[in-house]
Amino acid sequence: MNTSTFLRRVLPALLIVAIAVGVFFWTTRAKPVNVVLKTVDRGNVESTVVNTRAGTVEACLRTKLSTIMGGRIEFLGVKEGDKVKKGQLLLKLWNDDQKAQQTLAEAQRASAVQRVKEVCTTAASSLREAERQTSLRGRGFVSEAKEDSARSEADARSAACNTARADIVQADARINVTKVEQGRMTLYAPFDGTVAKIVGELGEYSTPSPPGVPTPPAIDLIDDSCLYINAPMDEVDAPKIKAGLPVRVSLDAMPKKPLKGKVRRVAPYVVAVEKQARTVDVEVDFEMPATGNLLVGYSADVEIVLDTRTNVLRVPTAALIEGGRVMVLNLDTGKLEERKVKTGTANWEFTEIVEGLTEGERIVTSLEREGVKVGARATAATADEKSK
């Protein structure tokens, strides 16, 4: 078989095999993965920390009132939701026995006052008589013994007068004791506020909380004209938080109305609610007086701004790979590559880029998509989405 015959027979077969192999590799090779790209731009980046558990809206003034003594509720002058003034009588227990003791003490004082008038009048008369006897003794009309007798009588009467006056002081003290006893059976508002809750009804028995036994207070009084937020922060973040730092407040009850605030106080101790959850309470004041629609007890989240970097290179935090790397698309090869970067200030939304990227470069943000890895062929799936 000559060469020309061989080529005519073999060459078509080889071409068919080569085409088949090419088709096979073309159909079986990995298809380019669609990735979302984000242009590296400039903007502001804040370093923030947030509470580990929901915070709570608290009243600046709140007190849970209970009587010192137990007894039957005789007077209940308020109901839940009432506005009260400082010094207003809220609740009184039955205390007729103490009133009777006060009446008795007042009667004893009145008797002591009359006794003072009687005794002190006699003492004054005896003193005048003693002075008269002294004058007569000086002129030789009476004996020295008579003068001494008059002087002794005057001294005795004067002592009796002082004793009677002491009885009045004692009676006053007795009256004060009865008033103090009655004070144990009454509750007065210590400040202007709102009655949040009342435990007990008219005629029921009210019991104060003994030591070590948690008993609900008779009246829970709050001053809702001044509110703040108490939020638990992770103990790791606590050293970074200082009074005066700006805060963004989010309320579950008003999700579309974020509020501004400032750190008022950082607690000087750690709260160990659970073995694995040690927190530090941080108090936040509202920048503007927060009243009206806000209720004591609302849950709230606080985001404390530790630092703000302005007009810096930034990328979405979600685009960063562990180890300080980002994924970029090489437009020349059409393949994904990793780039090592140096980061600065960061939060959950943006991270500052110090080194490794330039403004205008595009990085991959769809890292969660299947097939996104170093060396994979890729194409841009969507246009850039500029951050607000």
Image (cartoon, rainbow, N blue to C red):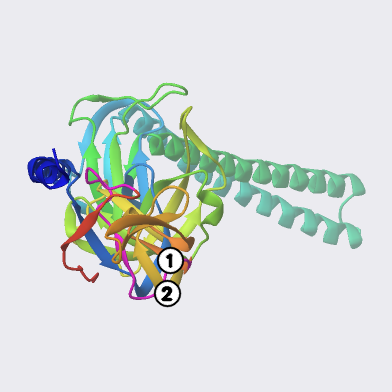
Indicate the position of residue 295 as horizontal and vertical percent values. Answer: 22, 52
Residue found at x 13% / y 41%: 6
Instruction: Find the magenta span and give its range.
Output: 355-373
Check disc 2 and give the amino acid type.
Val
Indicate the position of residue 362 as horizontal and vertical percent values. Answer: 30, 67
Check disc 1 and give the amino acid type.
Glu
Q: Is residue 202 magenta?
A: no
Q: Which residue is mark 2?
A: 312
Residue 240 lies left or right of residue 28; in this view the side is right
Q: Secondary structure at mark 1?
A: strand
Residue 314 lies left or right of residue 251; in this view the side is right
Q: Secondary structure at mark 2?
A: strand
Indicate the position of residue 289 as horizontal and vertical percent values. Answer: 30, 67
Which corner quadrant of the image does residue 291 belong to?
A: bottom left
Q: Is residue 370 magenta?
A: yes
Q: Nearer the viewer, residue 237 or 368?
A: 368
Main secondary structure found in the magenta portion = loop
The quadrant of the image that shows the N terminus is top left
